Image (cartoon, rainbow, N blue to C red):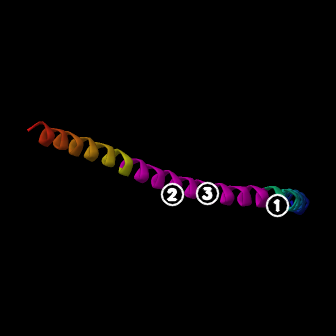
């Protein structure tokens, strides 16, 4: 009975050592992945801010074009009278 338990414990210990060894070997890969994901998140945030600023500026140009067209029509109406 003890030999079966000893074999099971030995197998479990060996499995644990294998998993720990694999994790130690894959640490640089996970570290690189996390580093790249952080850089991507930063770049996406920067992109969102830049797009929002561009859209605000574009909206101002559109508002200016809309307002100036209306004012031009009013000025033309005054010149006609």
Quarter holding residue 17: bottom right
Residue 43 position, x and y percent, is 62, 56
> Is residue 64 one of those drawn in magenta?
no
Residue at the location (90% across, 61% down)? 10
In front: 18, or 59?
59
Q: Which residues are magenta?
A: 30-59
Q: Which mark is residue 57?
A: none
Front-most of residues 12 and 59: 59
What distance separates the C-alpha of mark 3 from that of mark 2? 12 Å
Comparing marks 3 and 1, which lies closer to the viewer? 3
Depth-wise, is mark 1 or mark 2 nearer the camera? 2
Asked if residue 41 lies in the magenta stretch, the reply is yes
Q: Which residue is mark 1?
A: 27
Instruction: Please name the residue that numbered disc 2 is placed on.
Output: 49
Earlier-in-chain disc, 1 versus 2: 1
Q: Which residue is mark 3?
A: 41
């Amino acid at each position: 009975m003890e030999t079966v338990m000893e074999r099971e414990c030995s197998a479990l210990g060996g499995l644990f050592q294998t998993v720990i060894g694999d994790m130690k070997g894959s640490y640089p890969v996970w570290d690189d992945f996390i580093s790249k994901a952080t850089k991507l998140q930063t770049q996406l945030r920067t992109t969102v801010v830049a797009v929002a600023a561009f859209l605000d500026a574009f909206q101002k140009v559109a508002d200016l074009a809309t307002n100036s067209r209306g004012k031009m029509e009013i000025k033309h109406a005054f010149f006609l009278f």
